Amino acid sequence: MKISSLLEACIVSLTLLVLPERSLLLTEGSAGDSSSRRIDIPGNCGTVPRLFVIRTSLDQLALGQPKVSTGEELPPAVADKVGDLGLQLWEHFYRVGLERNKESGTSDSECYSKVADVFGNIYRVQYKGPIDVFVADLYGSFGYEEVRLVLFDNATRRVTASPPGIFSRWRMMAKDDSLRGRVLRFEDIDRDGRTEIGALEYTHNGNVYTGQVIHYFSVDDALNLRESLALEVETLTPHIRIQRSTQWVSANSLNLIVRTYNEYDGSGKLIDNKSYRLSRRDRSEPYQLVGKFEKQDPPWIVSGCEETSANDFLAHGCGFRY
């Protein structure tokens, strides 16, 4: 085995011990579990810092910028929401640290991570009319990173109740680390007059595959964000490249176009071009493959994530995170 492969395998083994499996944090006994006991923050761990915002446009939004410590403060409702999300993330990894200390017999006197270290930059982009979308970059331990999407109505002061998260650890796999102009997109994919918010995630699994997934969220009048489609627009392996797109059919139906290219010989030649039907009963549900596709059969219809069934992926994205 190559040294690089061995090193990556070791990293996988370590991080699989500490990172949540399905949702970003909501595992039994974690900080996201409202039934779990809250942990008092030790004094040497600090507190939630003052949070500032970077105003930008959709085509200029770029993650990974130097952290700002002055400037425009967040609206109070957004600051409270992002602060709570950051504390949940900190508490999850703090619990992990306590468990590791218990197993190794070491002291709990040192913070596993400071509260302030959880909070990266927060970006503000106009969505439509008086409504803005805030993109909060949050960090855990072991290279964990997630982005939370929070809508805020400047007229009513209403805020998204449960901001969805995008797993962002593998953003480093992009050729352009900043992902400038590609983090978010606003598209009306079902042509119902309501613009969906699409958020980009990079997926990665060792030397098996790297992918780009757009998570499309529908927005209701209460500013709730509900995932309607996880579309892996590109899958790249040492041998093939798969590109996927959708084509509108009707209010609740899309065609999924899947094109496969040869990367083994460097030709990039198109070797397969197929179409599948995606459907849903109404806007409140995610799109699903029409037909019997408990597994991705034939392989990789919707994703290179083999740990997740085709329809589960379309509804939530890949459940395998490390």
Image (cartoon, rainbow, N blue to C red):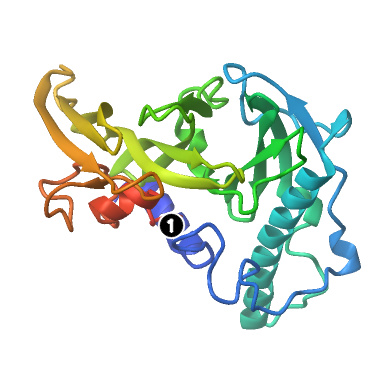
In the rendered image, residue 123, in percent from the top left (x then y), is placed at 70, 31
* Left or right: where 123 falls relative to 103: right
At 20% from the left and 29% from the top, the residue drawn is 257
Reading the image, the residue beneath label 1 is 12
In the rendered image, residue 295, in percent from the top left (x then y), is placed at 17, 56
265 versus 46 height, above or below = above
* Left or right: where 237 falls relative to 140: left
At 71% from the left and 36% from the top, the residue drawn is 153
In the rendered image, residue 227, in percent from the top left (x then y), is placed at 44, 46
At 15% from the left and 37% from the top, the residue drawn is 276
Q: Nearer the viewer, residue 286 or 53?
A: 286
At 33% from the left and 37% from the top, the residue drawn is 232
> Where is residue 78, by image quadrant?
top right
303 versus 24 height, above or below = above
Count of numbered badges drawn on the protein: 1
- Within 10 angstroms of label 1, few (less than 14), some, or many (20 or more) residues? some
In the rendered image, residue 201, in percent from the top left (x then y), is placed at 46, 38
Q: Amino acid at mark 1?
A: Val
> Where is residue 273, by image quadrant?
top left
> Where is residue 141, by image quadrant?
bottom right
SS for dot 1: helix
* Left or right: where 195 falls relative to 203: right
Q: Nearer the viewer, residue 77 or 49?
A: 77
